[in-house]
């Protein structure tokens, strides 16, 4: 356990406090990171103000952005604490706590990053950083481990990996394995072997924030391969002067069955797959975290929910790849804005053929129809996107017009039973197609023309 005593500024309207005493407690056995704030006076009033402000924000990540560290008291090897991405997981607003330092308001953070002094000399050309993954990665890493054995000596444990070479991944080279901690009995025989799945990043001097982006993209790529969300519990990134650790403690997850890309008709093992990833996408790591989370949510859903999640993933991929293009594209008219007058005149002519008691409704809707008629059908708006990713829905036995039609019907309230055979078959095809879109996007399999 690590108890970091420090002082902070809180930059919140009406609460603006300077040099406030605080403690951050890092304990691997907890699934949140306790944070205590010791206000100088009016604790009850400050607590009410602070809790009300936090609850009024769009989410609990806003509080951390308002904190800045002014001084670290101890331990002396801690350089700084970064709360900017810290999201509150718990507000202890029932009672005010008290310890030997006085009364405090307690919170629990889901994430925090801490800068430490390097305790040893590091060659800037040969640096290692480590991502410790949660238990959802256990069976995936286990699948690339050779059979563990005691070899010829029952006291000597040996665990080896099927990975023969480092995986080139942008500015890093990757190694996947377990960190094994062995507890021996009194006769020096292995008693308990604790195995933590991890990814080791071999790199030269790099920006630490970039290394965290690498960590995010790598775990997202593993999540896609696995078909369920994999996250990291701690990312330990290094340069020659600073070790920065991003703690993201979580409740222990159950180990899940390892899957692979074969279910999307993609024949790649984990090593080949990771070697193909376009690491330039590291700048978009937050986007891919969200995309793959949505896709994995769809994999564990069914019926119309599953279908709409796949469609959302496809829409987001298209918007991200074709940045600058509107979500809805218009036809190109040779007479420019003059087309508005022509469309209004034609709609007015049609108005005469509308049933008399519905004409007023039609007339009131003319301006909306004027807008909508100028847009390309949604089925055509994806044509360029699919071409860029070298994929054709027809090769997956999908008629894209029907996909768009079903999306529109569901959006407008059509109810379809989850066990409807046609929907189940349709989802199976769209699932495979969406998986291939993500794979081609991640591996930069795009039309060069």
Image (cartoon, rainbow, N blue to C red):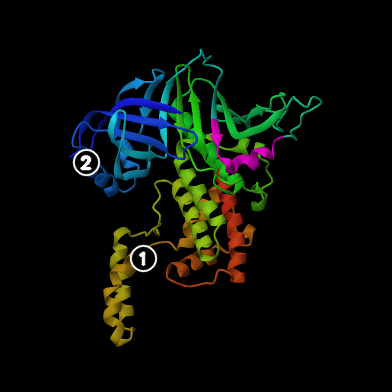
Q: Does the magenta segment cover residue 329?
A: no
What residue sits 54% from the left and 65% below the top?
303
- Is residue 166 shown to the viewer in this render? no
Q: Which residues are magenta?
A: 131-145
Instruction: Determine whether, in the image, residue 9 is placed left or right of residue 212.
Output: left
Q: Is residue 379 above or below residue 240?
A: below
Q: Position of residue 353 (x, y in %)?
A: 34, 84
Instruction: Determine whether, in the image, residue 386 is placed left or right of residue 425.
Output: left
For the C terminus, the quadrant is top right
Q: Residues within 10 Å of mark 1 (few under 14, many from 20)?
A: few
Residue 164 sits in quarter:
top right
Q: Position of residue 221 (x, y in %)?
A: 56, 41
Instruction: Determine whether, in the image, residue 147 is placed left or right of residue 329.
Output: right
Q: Residues within 10 Å of mark 2 (few under 14, many from 20)?
A: some
Which mark is nearer the camera, 2 or 1?
A: 2
What residue sits 52% from the left and 41% below the top?
231
Furthest residue toward top: 121
What residue sits 33% from the left and 37% below the top?
64
Q: Does the magenta segment cover residue 136?
A: yes
């Amino acid at each position: 356990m690590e108890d970091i005593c420090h002082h902070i500024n809180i930059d919140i309207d009406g609460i603006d406090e300077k040099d406030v005493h605080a403690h951050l407690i890092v304990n691997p056995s907890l699934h949140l990171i306790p944070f205590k704030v010791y206000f100088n006076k009016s604790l009850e009033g400050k607590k009410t103000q602070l809790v009300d402000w936090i609850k009024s924000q769009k989410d609990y990540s806003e509080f951390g952005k308002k904190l800045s560290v002014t001084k670290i008291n101890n331990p002396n090897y801690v350089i700084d604490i970064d709360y900017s991405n810290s999201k509150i997981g718990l507000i202890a607003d029932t009672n005010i706590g008290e310890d030997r330092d006085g009364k405090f308001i307690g919170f629990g953070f889901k994430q925090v990053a801490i800068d430490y002094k390097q305790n040893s000399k590091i060659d800037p050309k040969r640096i290692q950083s480590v991502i410790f993954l949660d238990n959802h990665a256990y069976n995936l890493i286990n699948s690339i481990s050779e059979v563990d054995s005691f070899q010829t000596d029952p006291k000597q444990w040996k665990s080896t990996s099927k990975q023969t070479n480092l995986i080139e991944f942008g500015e890093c080279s990757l190694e996947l394995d377990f960190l094994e901690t062995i507890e021996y009995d009194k006769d020096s025989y292995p008693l308990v072997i604790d195995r933590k799945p991890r990814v080791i990043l071999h790199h030269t001097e790099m920006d630490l924030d970039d290394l965290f982006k690498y960590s995010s993209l790598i775990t997202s790529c593993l999540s896609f391969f696995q078909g369920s969300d994999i996250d990291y519990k701690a990312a330990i990134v290094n340069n020659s002067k600073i070790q920065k650790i991003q703690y993201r403690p979580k409740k222990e997850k159950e180990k899940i069955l390892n899957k692979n890309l074969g279910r999307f008709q993609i024949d790649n093992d984990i090593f080949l797959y990771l070697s193909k990833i376009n690491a330039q996408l590291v700048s978009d790591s937050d986007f891919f975290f969200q995309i793959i989370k949505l896709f994995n949510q769809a994999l564990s859903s069914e019926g119309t929910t599953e279908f709409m999640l796949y469609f959302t993933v496809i829409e987001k991929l298209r918007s991200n790849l074709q940045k600058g293009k509107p979500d809805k594209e218009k036809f190109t008219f040779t007479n420019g804005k003059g087309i508005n007058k022509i469309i209004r005149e034609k709609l007015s002519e049609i108005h005469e053929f509308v049933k008399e008691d519905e004409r007023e409704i039609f007339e009131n809707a003319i301006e909306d129809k004027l807008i909508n008629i100028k847009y390309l059908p949604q089925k055509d708006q994806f044509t360029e996107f699919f071409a860029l990713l070298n994929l054709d829905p027809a090769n997956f036995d999908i008629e894209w017009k029907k996909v768009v039609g079903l999306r529109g019907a569901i959006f407008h309230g059509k109810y379809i039973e989850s066990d409807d055979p046609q929907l189940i078959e349709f989802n199976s095809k769209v699932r495979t197609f969406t998986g291939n879109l993500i794979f081609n996007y991640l591996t930069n399999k795009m039309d060069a023309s």
